[in-house]
Image (spheres, rainbow, N blue to C red):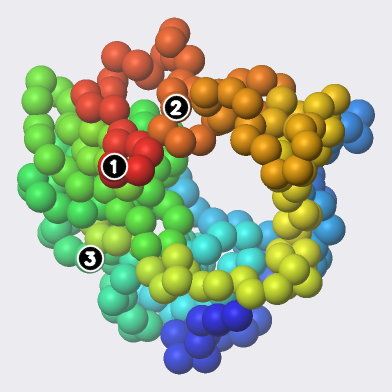
Amino acid sequence: MTRISYKEKLTSNNPIKSLTKGFKRSVGRNSAGRITTRHKGGGHKRRYRDIDFKYNKKDIPARIDTIEYDPNRSAYIGLLVYADGEKRYTVLPQTLKVGETILVSENAPVKNGNRLPLKSIPIGTFVYNVEIKPEGGAKLARSAGNSAEVIAQDAGYTHIKMPSSEVRKVLATAWASVGEVSNDEHRLVTIGKAGRARHMGRRPTVRGSAMNPVDHPHGGGEGKGGRGHRRARSKWGKPTGKGQKTRRSKKYSNALIVRRRKVGKKR
């Protein structure tokens, strides 16, 4: 079992009360209480931190007051204190420290933490908290250690290379923050024991090959048999894992995909 030494990174243990609220976690159930996503449930009670993904306070510099832990996401969050006195939480990039300032502006310098339109960001720059639609709020590259790379500007679109290796077109008027998301050590953590996973809200995952034929397409057989199918499939018979394509052929964003992500063993 491995951990992250948060004491070396965080500067505050208590979140701002006005920016937090209680909430009920869905734990994979719908409004009727039926399981819609397996392996979710239980876990420690959490307080929700109200994170600013809209970034609609523009041309006002903000100072990083604290670096804090957020149980609802893998990245560190920081308390921004704007020049007019307003306070907001934001997802922090790497290397940014307490006391440094960030700016959301069309004329902001291309500096770690600053936010500006994709058309103003040079090719080769790594970005995070990327919008899909202008003023729609950050949607892409938000988890720990992630970033997207600006690789081209073309006819009103910016081509960005996603963390999955997919190359996608985004409107050049959409906004993004410069840098890479903090807490890149998150991917190195080994949970180590079942109890720790349960505290995180993760319920047990049973292999399909350990089930009966009535419960899973991989189930049944004498002893440790193969799955009996050429391709792995889910409990409902849909293709899964091992580089198989699961994307809908008529998905709205297919026209924006320049290059599909690399999948499977050869990646």
Which residue reaches farthest right?
A: 32
Which residue reaches farthest front?
A: 222
Examine the rendered structure and indicate whether residue 7 appears above or below residue 177.
Answer: below
> Which amino acid, by three-letter code, is at mark 2?
Gln
Which residue reaches farthest bottom?
A: 8
Examine the rendered structure and indicate whether residue 114 appears above or below residue 97.
Answer: above
Which label was assigned to residue 266? Answer: 1
> Which residue is more in the foreground, 233 or 142?
233
Instruction: Classify 10 Å Cα crowding around label 3: few (below 14), some (14-19), many (20 and above).
Output: many
> Which amino acid, by three-letter code, is at mark 3?
Asn
Residue 49 in sight from this viewpoint: yes
> Which amino acid, by three-letter code, is at mark 1?
Lys
Question: Mark 3 = which residue?
Answer: 112
First along the sequence among labels 1 and 3: 3
Question: Mark 2 = which residue?
Answer: 244
Instruction: Classify 10 Å Cα crowding around label 1: few (below 14), some (14-19), many (20 and above).
Output: few
Q: Residue at x 91, y 35 (%)?
A: 33
Q: CA distance from mark 2 to mark 1?
A: 13 Å
Q: In the structure shown, which secondary structural element does the residue marked by tag 2 occupy?
A: loop
In the image, taking residue 151 as reference, residue 100 lies left or right, namely right
From the top left corner, tell me how far across and down residue 7 is, in percent: 52, 91
In the image, taking residue 163 as reference, residue 53 lies left or right, namely right
From the top left corner, tell me how far across and down residue 170 is, in percent: 26, 29
First along the sequence among labels 2 and 3: 3
In the image, taking residue 236 as reference, residue 147 lies left or right, namely left
